[in-house]
Image (cartoon, grey):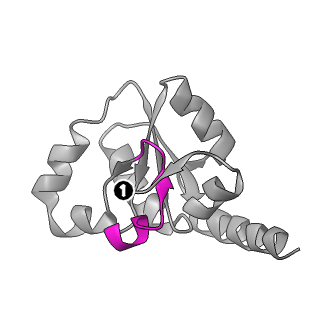
């Protein structure tokens, strides 16, 4: 029951913060990734990523975008324009911020919301 309640709360917060970008659920994001049609970007801070990340996700913390624009621009230029960029964070709010900036640069971006939704779906993770 606690897991179901937690998943419900996560879904509510994710939907509340994922405003302008399209949304994608973890299973669909994983499918796009395994079909090589998407890259997955974790925008959480490094201390948060220590508990785990989506397997093969790129780490691009929001603080990089805010505090080191040159480094952020350099990283973003490596993203393939022919693939969807799936962004996620803790609950979806920071992913929305980064995603909107990527969309301004011409990327197709979808917000997956929070890392916990990936965990609850039982999808592959890794420690960095």
> Magenta stretch?
46-57
In the rendered view, would you say 24 is above or below 4?
above
In the shown orientation, is residue 75 left or right of residue 90? left
In the shown orientation, is residue 118 left or right of residue 80? right
Within 10 Å of disc 1 (Cα), the crowding (few <14, some 14-19, many 20+) is: few
Q: Position of residue 116 (x, y in %)?
A: 61, 63
In the rendered view, would you say 33 is above or below 92?
above
> Count the marks: how many?
1
Residue on which disc 1 sits: 128
Residue at position x 56%, y 60% in the image: 115
SS at circle 1: loop
In the rendered view, would you say 24 is above or below 95?
above
The answer to whether residue 19 is seen in the rendering is: no
Q: Position of residue 62 (x, y in %)?
A: 32, 65
Residue at position x 32%, y 62% in the image: 61
Q: Position of residue 82 (x, y in %)?
A: 38, 24
On-image quarter of the N terminus: bottom right
In the shown orientation, is residue 12 left or right of residue 92? right
In magenta stretch: residue 67: no
Residue found at the very far left of the displayed protein: 70
On-image quarter of the C terminus: bottom left
Q: Position of residue 123 (x, y in %)?
A: 63, 46
Front residue of 52/114: it is: 52
The image quarter containing residue 5 is bottom right
Front residue of 85/60: it is: 60
In the rendered view, would you say 55 is above or below 108?
below
């Amino acid at each position: 029951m606690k897991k179901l309640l937690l998943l419900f709360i996560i879904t509510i917060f994710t939907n509340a913060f994922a405003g302008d970008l399209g949304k994608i659920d973890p299973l669909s994001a994983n499918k796009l990734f395994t079909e090589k049609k998407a890259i997955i970007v974790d925008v959480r801070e490094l201390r948060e990523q220590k508990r785990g990340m989506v397997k093969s996700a790129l780490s691009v913390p929001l603080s990089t975008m805010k505090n080191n624009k040159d480094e952020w621009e350099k990283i973003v230029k490596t993203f393939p324009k022919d693939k969807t960029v799936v962004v996620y964070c803790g609950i979806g709010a920071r992913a929305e911020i980064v995603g909107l900036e990527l969309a301004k640069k011409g990327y197709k971006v979808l917000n997956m919301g929070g890392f916990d939704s990936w965990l609850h779906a039982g999808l592959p993770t890794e420690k960095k």
